[in-house]
Amino acid sequence: MKSKMRIDSGFTLIELVIVVAIVGVLATLAYPNYSSYILRGARADAMTILLDAANKQEQYFVDNREYASKLEDIGVPTTSENGYFAISVSVSNGGYTLTATAAGGPVQGDLECSSLSINNLGMKTVTGTASADTCWER
């Protein structure tokens, strides 16, 4: 009598556990970098509209000898393109400050750069735990 040898193919439980552990470690290492990348991308949305609004404020000043007190006067929306930031303007003492405040999306819980501002002198400031240089870098 001949015995038939059976050959099993597939993965063992140990092999699957090792693969799952490796994937878990890689995900743990990659997620903080991914989150940082997403926040920087969202902040770029705010920087773009603030710089555009500052440029339009200066053009408005050339035409009217005063800065616009409403964003509508210079054709700037009250939210950023992706809707992550609410945009506001304040005019005082012959100058202005434009501010983008986190309003939704990935920046909602951003404690480092919860708002970005730029004034008529080009000074860039932030509200949050990070420095202006960190928040305004691209």
Image (cartoon, helix red, strand yellow):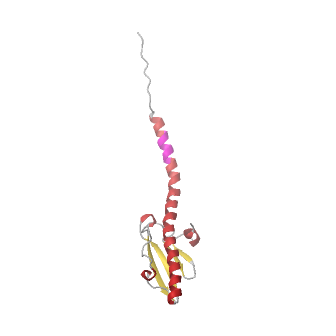
Instruction: Give residue 78's position: percent from left, percent from top.
Output: 42, 76
Q: Residue furthest top?
A: 1
Q: Is residue 115 above or below residue 26?
A: below
Q: Nearer the viewer, residue 64 or 121?
A: 64
In the rendered image, the vertical position of residue 85 relative to residue 12, given as above or below: below
Seen at 50% across and 80% down, the residue is: 56
Q: Position of residue 52 (x, y in %)?
A: 51, 75
The quarter of the image holding the N terminus is top left
Query: Vertical placement of 67 versus 19: above or below?
Result: below
Question: How many numbered markers are drawn?
Answer: 0
- At horizontal 45% and vertical 33% (from top left) the residue drawn is 12
Query: Residue most toward the front?
Result: 63
Does residue 20 show up magenta in the picture?
yes
Nearest the camera: 11 or 82? Answer: 82
Which quarter shows the C terminus?
bottom right
Q: Position of residue 77 (x, y in %)?
A: 42, 75
Residue drawn at x 48%, y 77% is 99
> Which secondary structure class fits the magenta region best?
helix
Q: Which residue is drawn at the image coordinates 51% and 82% (left, top)?
A: 57
Q: 22 or 138: which is nearer to us? A: 138
What segment carries the magenta color? 18-24
Determine if the magenta segment contains residue 72: no
Residue 119, image x, y percentages: 54, 81
Q: Using the image as rendered, state which of residue 103 and residue 74 is in the foreground.
A: 74
